[in-house]
Amino acid sequence: MKAHITIEINGFASRVQGRLDRLGLTPEIAAQTAGLPADFLGKVLAGDQPAPRGKRLIRLADALATSVSYLIGLDPDVAVPDEYLQEDQGQLGLLAGDEEALLRAYRRLDISSRAALIQVVLKMTPEPEVQEKKSRR
């Protein structure tokens, strides 16, 4: 089983902020240059958004005129592990935005709250329609 690697957000945010300061860029301009939503870096810097992965991370490093290794806190002579360059499911379009938001909120819940939420959702969802097969005569 492959371990899911996450980027330590505080160090990442401080390195991004350092590059923004050095280049004289606003988070909005840097995000747009990287092809990201204008509010993306503001959310990352505030700790409300996880650090990007995959193509988004590469484009951000380019927009900040630095390397992916630097942004994720690695020695520049060390190759970036493939796990950082793989896309998240949501970024591949496998989840809709609202589904992604629900999943993030769900993951912040404790176990008993998760169980309660599942029960509420199950009660709210309609039963699937079962089509009866018509008998041939």
Image: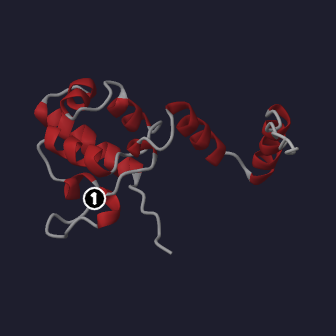
Compared to residue 79, the image places residue 30 above or below, namely above
Q: Label 1 amino acid?
A: Gly
Which residue is depicted at the point 44% across and 38% down? 49
For mark 1, what is the residue? 73
Residue 19 horizontal/vertical position (percent): 18, 40
Which residue is depicted at the point 81% across and 39% down? 131
Which residue is depicted at the point 40% across and 55% down? 8
Residue 73 horizontal/vertical position (percent): 27, 58
For the image, the number of numbered tags is 1
Q: Nearer the viewer, residue 134 or 84?
A: 134
* 125 left or right of 15 in image: right
Q: Nearer the viewer, residue 127 or 80?
A: 127
* 117 left or right of 29 in image: right
Determine crowd level at label 1: few under 14, some 14-19, many 20+ residues with C-alpha closer than 10 A.
some
Rendered image quadrant of residue 82: bottom left
Compared to residue 23, the image places residue 135 above or below, namely below
Q: Nearer the viewer, residue 4 or 86?
A: 86
Q: Nearer the viewer, residue 88 or 15?
A: 88
Rendered image quadrant of residue 59: top left
The C terminus - image quarter = top right
Compared to residue 74, the image places residue 66 above or below, namely above
Q: Dot 1: what SS? A: loop
* 88 left or right of 98 in image: left
